[in-house]
Amino acid sequence: MEKRILGYVRYIDSILAESSIQDVESLKKEHLVQLSFFQHERLIHLIVTITFAILEMFAMMMCVLSFSLGVMALAIAILILLLPYIRHYYILENQVQKMYVQYDKILEKMEGRNTLQHH
């Protein structure tokens, strides 16, 4: 998913860098579809990340209350899983925020085109 969202954001940036876009309306619609996919992915990863963070807190509390190697191993295992989830969620969150900015730029291009058509 990381590769997909990073590639998509670069793709839209390259389109927005062009002086004129052939079909801005189609670009806007497609961008909204992709944005909704990535927002859903972001929500799912937020839920998973929060779940793992809660599990890690419980495992750490169990370590403090009744230390055993098994509980310590569990806490370490959950932490090892939690860190990549945090990183992945961070990337999704930042890229979705960039997609919002891209959407605003698409709207600006549409307004510029509409202004030109009326003159």
Image (cartoon, grey):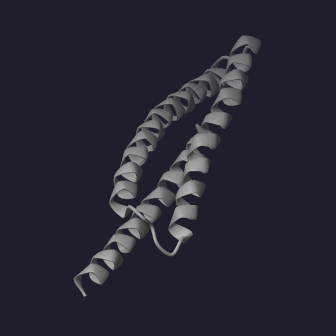
Q: Nearer the viewer, residue 78 or 21?
A: 21
Q: Residue at x 67, y 35 (%)?
A: 84
> If the image is split into quadrants, where does the N terminus sit?
top right
Residue 68, position in %: x, y?
73, 14
Query: How many marks are shown on the rendered structure?
Result: 0
- In the picture as drawn, the residue positioned furthest to the bottom comes out as 119
Q: Residue at x 40, y 62 (%)?
A: 103
Residue 36, position in %: x, y?
38, 44
Q: Tell me: 21 left or right of 17.
A: left
- In the picture as drawn, the residue positioned furthest to the left comes out as 118
Q: Which picture quadrant has residue 62? A: top right
Q: Tell me: 49 left or right of 112.
A: right
Residue 56, position in %: x, y?
60, 28
Q: Which picture quadrant has residue 39? A: top left
Residue 24, position in %: x, y?
37, 63
Q: Nearer the viewer, residue 73 or 21?
A: 21
Does residue 23 lie above or below 55 as drawn? below
Q: Tell me: 114 left or right of 10.
A: left
Q: Residue at x 50, y 30 (%)?
A: 48
Does residue 41 lie above or below 117 as drawn? above
Does residue 21 lie above or below 40 as drawn? below
Q: Residue at x 58, y 63 (%)?
A: 14
> If the image is split into quadrants, where does the C terminus sit?
bottom left
Q: Nearer the viewer, residue 53 or 44?
A: 44
